[in-house]
Amino acid sequence: MNDIAKKLLKEVTGLDEMPKGAYSIRENSKSLAKQSSENIEIVSKKDNSGIDIIVKPNTKSENVFIPALVTCGGVSDLVYNDFYIGESADVTIIAGCGVGTGDSCDGSEHNGIHRFFLGKNSKVRYVEKHIGEGDGTGKRVIDPVSEILQEEGSYMEMETTQIKGVDSTRRITRAKLKDDAKLVIKEKLMTHGDQFAESSFEVDMDGVDSSVNLISRSVAREQSRQTFISKINGNTKCTGHSECDAIIMDHGVVKAIPEITANHLDATLIHEAAIGKIAGDQMIKLMTLGLSEAEAEAKIIDGFLN
């Protein structure tokens, strides 16, 4: 692993070295390192590029790392990862992608197709961070797709972060929830320059007392553009909530497109959206405490995204 790969790995996962337990690290469309643990098996696919992650029932408090790294221009990476979570298991999945093109004029992209199959009463925390780096003109593109199927009583929490360097991203997330299943998605996003980002979520609550909570916090700077699309379908007694809060700066553009459909009398669905600039009184208050305008702006953005 070269210095670029080590830096990207640190930024997307926090790792300084190979982790203990189960992991699969991918670099430039190839498997760099892979290891299973006693309770988590990682198997290479035979028909596609990617892996199956199989978590045994009743596995508790274990982590699995599956980062993908691109360390040069001219790479087009497509990977299929399937997660099979056993009944009553409780695991954390640390994913993420770092695309570094250096000074290349050739762009690179990573497309990850992830499918999650959560067994009854299982619990998953999924953490995904995307970053792009490089001084060249090559575009850095990351287009992730997530498909989620949650069995009775399961819980999934997704934390996705993209705050620098990715020129274009289209995130698609689709989920189906059965009885008492709960899904929480927390998105943090910042774009700048001419970057474009689109997040599209569609959730079908098919099970009684299922619930979903979609929360997006974003900042669009300079000439960047963002689109947030959320579709929540309540097909039985259930609870759904979608929230998009965005700050626009300079000439940034943010579009929120909510859609909530109640197909049952006891489906309770709510959407909230707020898009605007940084409040002037917040800036003034911080500047009276000795911060410069740039420092006050950075402090407000950091607090908003965290």
Image (cartoon, helix red, strand yellow):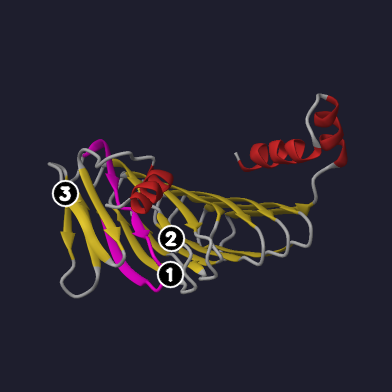
Front disc: 1 or 3:
1
Q: Is residue 85 visible?
A: no
Look at the image and say whether residue 176 sits in the magenta stretch. no
How far apart in space, not on screen, are marks 1 and 3 (Cα)? Answer: 25 Å
Tell which circle, 3 or 2, labels the residue nearer the N-terminal end. Answer: 3
* Numbered disc 1: secondary structure: strand
Q: What range is drawn magenta here?
A: 59-83
Which residue is identified by label 3?
Answer: 35
Q: Is residue 96 visible?
A: yes
What label sits on residue 260 in the rendered view?
Answer: none
Q: Are marks 1 and 3 in contact (CB under 8 Å)?
A: no
Residue at 39 percent of width and 40 percent of height: 14
Of residue 74 and residue 231, the one placed in the foreground of this image is 74
SS majority, magenta: strand
Look at the image and say whether residue 66 sits in the magenta stretch. yes
What label sits on residue 109 in the rendered view?
Answer: 1
What label sits on residue 99 in the rendered view?
Answer: 2
Of residue 123 and residue 41, the one placed in the foreground of this image is 41
Q: Is residue 252 above or below residue 302?
A: below
Residue at 80 percent of width and 38 percent of height: 293
Residues packed near mark 3 inside 10 Å, few (<14), some (14 to 19) or many (20 plus): some
Q: Are marks 2 and 1 in contact (CB under 8 Å)?
A: yes
* Numbered disc 2: secondary structure: strand
